[in-house]
Image (cartoon, rainbow, N blue to C red):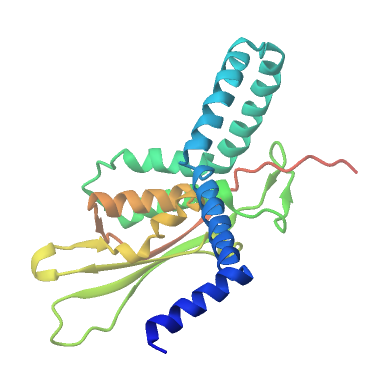
Amino acid sequence: MSLENSIKDVITKKLEDGTVEKLIEQQLEKGVANALDSLFRSYGDVTKVIEDKVKSVMIPFLETYDYSKYIVKLDSVLVDVLQSSALENKKLLENFKDLMIPEELKTIKVTELFERWMLHVAENVETDELEVCYEDGPPSYEYVDVRFEVEYNEERSWSSMKHAVLVFECEHDEKMNYEIRIHTWPKYDKGVWTIERNSIHDIKSLRHLDKFEMFLMKLQQNGTKLILDSDGESDEVEPEAEPEATFS
């Protein structure tokens, strides 16, 4: 029996027992399923028809619907959202606005910077453990001791640059303390010092910077030079906070 006759016999038997019909039926089912899946996909023809029909019904309804009863509720929700987000970002926005206003000082003396820092201490120093004075007028908190000092680095003999650290210190409240790194090239800077960039907080912390930190950042940003008219001084600062009067 030739190969062709053998193939014909096999096909004849499969046709007679229904095998070929089953295979055709299975493939036909797959083809129909694939076609329907394609029609109902996001960009399929049937999906497009259904979408158009839904739009034709929904849009006129939405356009004529009375939303007035929801306006008051919507307004209240928007106000709440704006207030909560504004409170969270208020400090960030204020500091950013302040940073955008350039500091016009070309130079500043270290004693003047010390005075600016003392204002910061007076406004922000912790008062919980301070004694209250009742003499000579309304009650007030006792003064806190403050000082500044310039700590010069020991440089190598061949170095053309000098480095130092400017230390502002409040004995009562360590949170008020600052270390500001500065440097100078004596040959070129003619007695003025530069506030180093890494002395200032990163811009990502802008929402957390206080007024004195913002002032330092503006000085550095503007290239304001520091004049060391003193290597150190001490003083006393009166807290701005006012204690409540108590009567025994």
Residue at (79% x, 39% y) in the render? 245
> Going by the picture, which residue comes out furthest to the right?
248
Apparent side of residue 65 relative to residue 134 in the rendered image (left or right): left
> Going by the picture, which residue comes out furthest to the left?
187
Question: Which x, y percent locates residue 44?
Answer: 47, 41
Q: In terms of depth relative to the viewer, which is nearer, 196 or 27?
A: 27
**Which quadrant, please, contains the N terminus?**
bottom left
> Going by the picture, which residue comes out furthest to the bottom?
1
Say which quarter of the image contains residue 220: bottom left
Q: Is residue 112 above or below residue 4?
A: above
Residue at (91% x, 44% y) in the render? 248
Residue at (22% x, 53% y) in the render? 223
Q: In terms of depth relative to the viewer, which is nearer, 110 or 155?
A: 155
Q: In terms of depth relative to the viewer, which is nearer, 116 or 181?
A: 181
Residue at (63% x, 15% y) in the render? 61
Question: Which x, y percent locates residue 222?
Answer: 24, 49
Say which quarter of the image contains residue 21: bottom right
> Going by the picture, which residue comes out furthest to the front?
1
Apparent side of residue 165 relative to residue 77 in the rendered image (left or right): left
Q: Is residue 82 above or below residue 23?
A: above
Question: Which x, y percent locates residue 64?
Answer: 62, 10
Question: Which x, y percent locates residue 217?
Answer: 35, 53
**Count of numbered labels shown in the rendering:** 0
